[in-house]
């Protein structure tokens, strides 16, 4: 039995050395499998063992994706670029890799380069598809970062028309954000209110809605959004700004007792030098002074 086992082992070793291409192919498949399974460090380690890095496109892409997942953006970019230099890469793969390169540039805060990659990816797509929607969102986000708000708004609107359902809240949030920058508050309200209540962007969107309502002096809506935010999304209302908004809403209704109550509670939670606390107290003092004036005149 021992001799048979040794013979079997010997045959296996001979087979390995006799067919290096088979071993390489197996390792290449392992890189793709490990990357798909989220085993990114193992995938890169396996990739480094391969004798020839000019392997099938899928293996090179898998290695680049694993590098990206590990935060190795430069290595990922170089991997994607090496594939993009191949003239035989299919149009679909080329489009996706160009868009991925744009995302990497955005993560590296090179927003002009990110916008160029997004524009290039869109140029490969002649019809409305979800991937084009994502490219428009990247383009818009890049423009937003450079202060080109009007152009960013145009890209976000185009992206909203293309994105698939699960990307729609992100597009609505982006639109609302740039519309605030453009002082298009009614449009921003409409888009932010369309974000589902259970989305990751909702806590910030609720705070933004409260801010828009305060800017537009819609004090009933200010009270509604701040109270909802404090109850349902407290992580977005950890500072004293929400209390300031509630004080302004109370003063707008002429309810000085409510304004005093909110101010007193806030002063126990935050520093006296807190900027919103200072403004709260000042607003309350002005309102009380005006009321005394009215009483004395009356």
Image (spheres, rainbow, N blue to C red):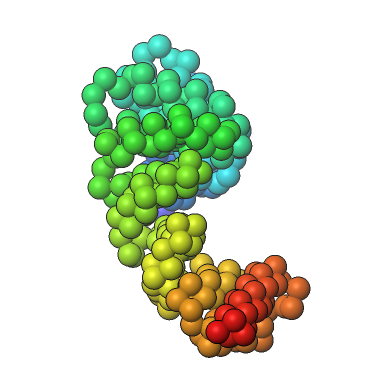
Q: Residue at x 32, y 46 (%)?
A: 167
Q: Provide residue 157's location: percent of width, then percent of height.
A: 34, 36
Q: Is residue 67 above or below residue 261?
A: above
- Does residue 100 show up? no
Whether residue 157 can be seen here? yes
In the rendered view, tell whether residue 214 sits above or below residue 138.
below
Outermost residue on the right side: it is 273
- Work out whether residue 24 or residue 128 is closer to the camera in this orientation and state it: 128
Place of residue 106 in the rendered image (x, y in percent of width and height, measured from the top left)? 54, 36
Name the foreground residue: 291 vs 134.
Answer: 291
The residue positioned 36% from the left and 24% from the top of the image is 122
The one nearer the camera, 52 or 297, is 297
Examine the image and state in which quarter residue 118 appears: top left
Q: Residue at x 51, y 43 (%)?
A: 181
Which one is nearer the viewer's eye here, 89 or 160? 160
The image quarter containing residue 196 is bottom left
- Vertical arrangement, residue 44 with respect to residue 20, above or below: below
């Amino acid at each position: 039995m021992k001799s048979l086992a040794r013979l079997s082992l010997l045959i296996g070793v001979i087979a390995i050395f006799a067919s290096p291409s088979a071993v390489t192919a197996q390792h290449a498949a392992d890189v793709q499998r490990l990357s798909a399974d989220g085993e990114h460090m193992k995938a890169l380690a396996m990739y480094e063992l391969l004798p020839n890095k000019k392997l099938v496109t899928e293996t090179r892409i898998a290695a680049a994706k694993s590098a990206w997942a590990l935060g190795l953006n430069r290595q990922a970019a170089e991997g994607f670029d090496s594939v993009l230099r191949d003239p035989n890469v299919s149009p679909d793969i080329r489009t996706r890799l160009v868009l991925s390169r744009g995302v990497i540039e955005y993560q590296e805060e090179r927003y002009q380069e990110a916008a160029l990659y997004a524009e290039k990816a869109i140029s490969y797509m002649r019809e409305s598809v979800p991937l084009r929607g994502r490219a428009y969102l990247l383009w818009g986000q890049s423009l937003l970062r450079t202060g080109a708000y009007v152009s960013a708004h145009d890209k976000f609107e185009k992206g909203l028309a293309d994105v698939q359902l699960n990307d729609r809240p992100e597009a609505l949030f982006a639109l609302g954000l740039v519309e605030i920058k453009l002082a298009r508050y009614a449009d921003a309200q409409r888009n932010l209110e369309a974000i589902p209540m259970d989305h990751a962007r909702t806590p910030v969107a609720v705070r933004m809605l409260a801010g828009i309502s305060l800017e537009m002096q819609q004090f009933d809506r200010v009270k509604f959004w701040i109270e909802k935010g404090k109850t349902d999304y407290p992580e977005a209302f950890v500072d004293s700004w929400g209390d300031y908004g509630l004080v302004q809403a109370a003063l707008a209704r002429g309810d000085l007792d409510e304004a005093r109550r909110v101010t007193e509670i806030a002063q126990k939670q935050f520093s006296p030098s807190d900027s919103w606390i200072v403004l709260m107290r000042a607003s309350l003092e002005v309102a009380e002074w005006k009321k005394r004036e009215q009483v004395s005149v009356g």
